[in-house]
Image (tube, grey):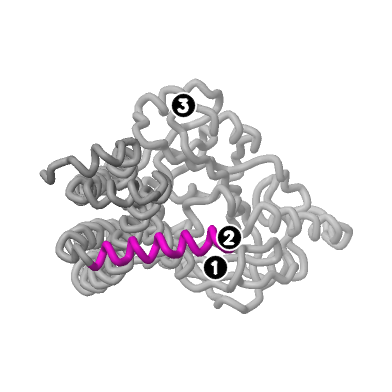
Amino acid sequence: MAKGLQDRWLLLRLAAQNVGRRRLRAIILAVAVTLGVGVGFAGFVTGWALSNGIAANLARMGADLLVVPRNTLVNITASLLTVQPTDATLPSDLADKLSVMPGVARVAPQRIVPVLVDGRPASLIAFDPVRDFSVLPWIDLHREGPLDADQVVAGARVSGEPGGEVEICGQPMRIYGRLERTGVGPFDESWFVSFDGLGDIAAFCRANRAAIPAGAEIAGGESGHHVDGQACLPDTRLDRVSAFLLQLAPGAKIDEVRFALGQLPSVRIVEGNTVLTTSRQALSALLLGIAVFTLFQLTAVLIVVSLLFSAMVQERWREVGLLRAMGAKPSQIMTVILGEAAIITGIGGLAGLIFGAALLLSFARSLGFYFGLLGIPFSWPSFAILETGAVVAVAFSAALGLVGAFVPAWRVRAMAPYALIQAEVR
């Protein structure tokens, strides 16, 4: 076993010596890999940053379509984020039917109820943090971790700071975060809680219902009761929602989806800004195009690597033939050639990371600054993603050399030693 390791180390040393003997071609090949890896790595990080920034901005535009009860009032604004406070509701299990309709990508239910917050009337909007795409994208400052059932989010026009506390229906709730101003009145003036949080508030109200005098309603049949400066929601049905917000899948036609939704009974369909819908769908197509372009670029680098190694191996046929004649095995010849390829392209990959980092710094100071002026944040990936991308880039560059050199190495492996020795250098 020790002899086998010694033989492999000797073969790798021979490969490294061969790299030094043909420096010009090695440098040309390494530069080609450097450019490919550097541009690919910088393109990946830049595409990630810009796509996240654009996606975050488009997510703030809310829904493409709203499904609401027939008599619900909806103010048409630039963003479909919610509906006007209403007592009309739809069954929550309708979400399952909506999510499987062709062209529908995401379904986010909301429930709006009137409550008293610190003794003052307000609207409380319950949403599902897992399905949501209209509330969480607007959060500015917030506490660490996900939204818990005992936490609320403050709208832009209500008082309260993250880390503070308010009473909703008499139950203390911690303030998780605040939303930025959206320009949608019912949205900015509301408080937000998860459906689990709404259930806890309703349970708290039912437990204290005995202390509520009859006829002390603050609004509506399901709305609540008011006593001693507190509001209660004992009769709130948790299996009902006020609206379903829908996002369409890429390539879906809004007219076809709206027609399908129109077959549902007792609902009203509200359409958002079609320009925003088209832009959101086009973003997915753009990212797919970038991925395809990167694939073609790496394919071109692979072809260059293969051609260069074909030439390098072909001019060394006599040298390989002499090694074979002196007893070198075909597998050892392949190890030397592939090792040489891995060394060159691995070094090129490391240089490509440095080149890619320089490109990223240039992008951040020019392209990133420009997009920042347009209101599109240049959101850098996390360190873990950058680290993974760097490791993958170096490993891919080494694999690129192995794949590119495999065909010429396999061709030489199959040739007889005398044929290699007698071959003319081309």
Q: Are marks 1 and 2 in contact (CB under 8 Å)?
A: yes
- Viewer-side residue, 298 vs 302: 302
Q: Amino acid at mark 2?
A: Phe
Circle number at residue 315: none
The residue carrying mark 1 is 154
- Left or right placement of residue 140 versus residue 376 in this view: right
Q: Amino acid at mark 3?
A: Pro
The residue carrying mark 3 is 102
Q: Secondary structure at mark 2?
A: strand
Q: Does the magenta segment cover residue 3?
A: yes
The residue carrying mark 2 is 192
Mark yes or no: residue 45 visible. Answer: no
- Left or right placement of residue 111 versus residue 412 in this view: right
Point out the tag, 1 or 2, that comes first from the N-terminus: 1
Q: Position of residue 310 (x, y in %)?
A: 22, 45
The residue depicted at 52 percent of the width and 30 percent of the height is: 267
| Spatial separation of the CA atoms under disc 3 and disc 1 | 35 Å
Point out the tag, 2 or 3, that comes first from the N-terminus: 3
| Spatial separation of the CA atoms under disc 1 and disc 2 | 6 Å
- Left or right placement of residue 356 versus residue 424 in this view: right
The residue depicted at 28 percent of the width and 46 percent of the height is: 321
Q: Position of residue 291 (x, y in %)?
A: 31, 46
Range shown magenta: 1-20
Q: Secondary structure at mark 1?
A: strand
Q: Position of residue 401 (x, y in %)?
A: 32, 52
At label 2, counting other C-alpha atoms closer than 10 Å, the crowd grade (few under 14, some 14-19, many 20 or more) is: many
Q: Amino acid at mark 1?
A: Ala
| Spatial separation of the CA atoms under disc 2 and disc 3 | 30 Å
